[in-house]
Amino acid sequence: MTRTKIIPIFPLDLVLFPRQELPLRIFEPRYKQLVDDCMLGNGQFGVCLIDEKNSVNGWNSPKLIGTIAKITKCEDIQLDGLQLHIETIGRNSFKIKKIISPLISQPTNYDPLSVEGHQEISEMHEKVGTGEKMYIQAEVEMIPEIDENISLDRWEKLVELWKKKVVKQALPQVVEPHTLKHVLEQYYLTTDTPTIDYIYSLSALGANDPNELQAILEVTTMEDLIQKVEELLTIK
């Protein structure tokens, strides 16, 4: 029987891949509570792309496939507890089996950037009890990693597809070959021994929308992964 566990969920407008770094600025009361709870525990929470078709008590709902983020650093930006800066790194991907709703619903006309918005949420939290969670949680099961590397030949073909896409999207401007080479070097994508992490990074570089990356995160075999990346990098 597959084991599940309950973790905090942070819906974002991005896709986090395993072993990729993700810095975040935390200012909403519900996510400061999430970070505080993580720091008292194992430092892990789930990052999921926002599901724009659904909501959870009025809040952004997560897609059902996400990635565990491990907090590696946490700093109080202004020493007042109002803003935190955290650095995280992606670990295993997971599948949500059950969403656990926060007790607080999103207020009407809620502004997460305003002092008034923060005060309103804090007052609501005091009424329901400060021990209750303001953030979404979920029961999740881990997804086994793709334990396989890509051949150099197939990697180079993906890189060529990326180059063609960049050149075509830039028209009528001309992109010189040395510029493409510089970008690959800048993102550490020049290699003779490519791994799955290189595929994830190239995908992120070639995507125009986070939903394109969600499809890549959800595949479970190397063949399907390469196929999805080829589709991403091919201009129809």
Image (spheres, helix red, strand yellow):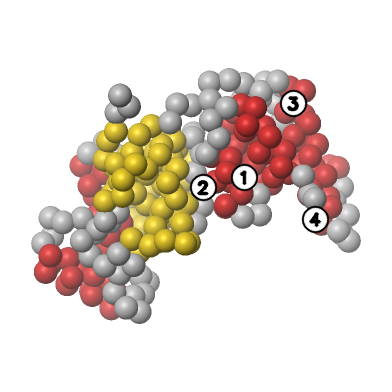
Element type at mark 4: helix
Percent of width and height locating residue 29: 27, 63
Residue 45 in the figure: left or right of residue 151 = left
Element type at mark 2: loop
Q: Quadrant of residue 106?
A: bottom left
- Residue occupying image coordinates x 37% and y 71%: 113
Percent of width and height locating residue 92: 43, 32
Q: Residue 15: which numbered mark, if any? A: 2
Q: Nearer the viewer, residue 236 or 165?
A: 236
For label 1, the residue is 204
Element type at mark 3: helix
Q: CA distance from mark 4 to mark 2?
A: 22 Å
Q: Residue 154: which numbered mark, if any? A: 3
| Category of crowding for the residue at label 1, using alpha-carbon neighbours closer than 10 angstroms: few (below 14), some (14–19), many (at least 20) | many
Element type at mark 1: helix
Q: Residue 169: which numbered mark, if any? A: 4
Q: CA distance from mark 3 to mark 1?
A: 18 Å
User: Which is nearer the N-term, disc 1 or disc 2?
Assistant: 2
